[in-house]
Image (cartoon, helix red, strand yellow):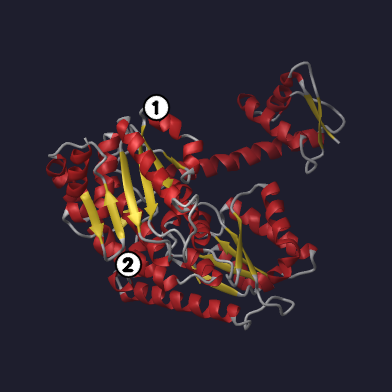
Amino acid sequence: MGIEEWERYKKYLNFNPEIGLMVDISRMKFPENYFDQMEPKMQRAHEDMNTLESGAIANPDEKRMVGHYWLRAPELAPGRMIAREIQKTLQAIKDFSKKVHAGKITSQKGKPFSRMLIIGIGGSALGPQFVSDALKTSGDPVKPYFFDNTDPDGFDRVLKEIKGGLSETLTIVISKSGGTIETRNGMLEAKAAYRSKGLRFDQHAVAITRANSDLDRMAKKEGWIARFPMWDWVGGRTSEASAVGLLPAALQGIDIDELLEGARLCDEVTRKKDLRTNPSALLALAWYHATGGQGKKDMVILPYKDRLQLFPKYLQQLIMESLGKERDLNGQRVNQGISVYGNKGSTDQHAYVQQLCEGVNNCFITFIEVLKDREGRSFMINGKATSGDYLNAFLQGTRRALSEKDRESITLTIEQIDARSIGTLIALYERAVGFYASLINVNAYDQPGVEAGKKAAGLVIELQAKSLAFLKKERGKSFTAEEIASAIGAPEEVEMVFKLLEHAAANADHPVKKIPGDSPFFSQYHYE
């Protein structure tokens, strides 16, 4: 068994010294003729990617190109104007960051910015959070904080962490359209927090948005410190190499040139048409084998490094939002996608590896191995091994145990965590997602389900407004949820009305009081 595994390992190990990456798919149990069978599909996937990078309309719903690859190689962009915009923005990011670090751009009170509050949602937060956490040091010149939801308690928790440092905090508002509800709410909460401290928000604010968006016009009118562009051809989940990710990273002190170089070199490697030498193609093929091309198994991401603990969350959005589609490119209902979850090793062994090993066999695992433990030497524990040796042993032992239980796995190995390797990982998975989308014939670059959810949320807010308006009009009287729903002409929405009234009565923001009944459904509500 051991020799057979070693021979298979040697046969299928993909080594890319130019980007410091190894990809091992030998523990995926595909047949020997699998690559030959998949060759035609993968070559079509390559053609699709070439068409994408050449500037074709890839998102017909929004009539836009998809060009995150151009961000790290502007010379490949379809047109000099796009290339110039990329280069101009990159230089503006560097210049702005240098001025902040040098104290030439300061807060309202003339203090250097020592903190930044990044307000975004989805890709506008997950990418910057992942990169920030992966590459942070004790000497970072600007410490990052995030508003990445519309949870009031979440806002309060972050502001309490900032404590008395709001006067030294630069706030970066990120929204392509300028109308994203969660980001707008976070911005308004931040404005209120600055105002409560006698500070002007505009003298602490930067916008990253599309030209002439609502946010762009507001920032210009109010005189914010700076504005940086977002382009239609960069989707949120692939925006880390744009101002969305680069501005926070540069302010934090991360070498953004190295991040971009890692992504650029990985793009070059993953354009290779030879499947055996293309790491992104190997990932896509391994996913297709594991899921039957129909999402039949979940993807579990296990990075054995604390600095990569947010990588599974980042990949959840990249993979699930890109691949989770109801219909394929021919309009056929396919309900595609791959579910993604993960936890860092060796925490995973004390969380859910038991089920992965012996429970229902409904997943495949990706181990992420980092060879370098730390800067400098480690001490020996009990004279035998370092703490890093133990972490590596847990990875190798878990990989073996899963294999012995007929669980399939992939192992990615990188030499160390630095800006270049993080750029490599981002680009590696971006292209793997593109390849896999071609294999299953879906559009990886639209998100109709997300838009449907946003629209539904707007209708819920309207229903709440009608319910509260009715109670205000009938002040002093009490009604059940069923009576209120009927009175506002929405009897079919009684469940939603009930949920909205329960929430309103639990908070001091709305003068709604609840009179409990024998059961929740007989409770009554009135306006005070």
Whole-angstrom CA distance, mark 2 to mark 1, is 40 Å
Residue extending farthest to the front is 383
Instruction: Note whether residue 47 is visible.
Output: no
Q: Residue at x 48, y 64 (%)?
A: 245
Whole-percent x and y of residue 240?
44, 61
Q: Residue at x 57, y 81 (%)?
A: 99
> Residue 413's image quarter?
bottom left
Tag of residue 358? 1
Q: What amino acid is labelled 2 in the image? A: Arg
Closer to the camera in the image, 82 or 376: 376
Whole-percent x and y of residue 378?
48, 60
| 141 up-or-down from 398: above or below | below
Q: Is residue 35 left or right of residue 486?
A: left
Q: Residue at x 45, y 74 (%)?
A: 89
Mark 2 or 1, nearer chain start: 2
Whole-percent x and y of residue 404?
31, 32
Instruction: Note whether residue 283 is visible.
Output: yes
Q: What amino acid is labelled 1 in the image? A: Glu
Q: Nearer the viewer, mark 2 or mark 1?
A: 1
Q: Quadrant of the N terminus?
A: top left
| 358 up-or-down from 58: above or below | above
Closer to the camera in the image, 517 or 244: 244
Q: Is residue 11 left or right of residue 402?
A: left
| 490 up-or-down from 300: above or below | above
Tag of residue 264? 2
Q: Are marks 2 and 1 in contact (CB under 8 Å)?
A: no
> Residue 190's image quarter?
bottom right
SS for callout 1: helix
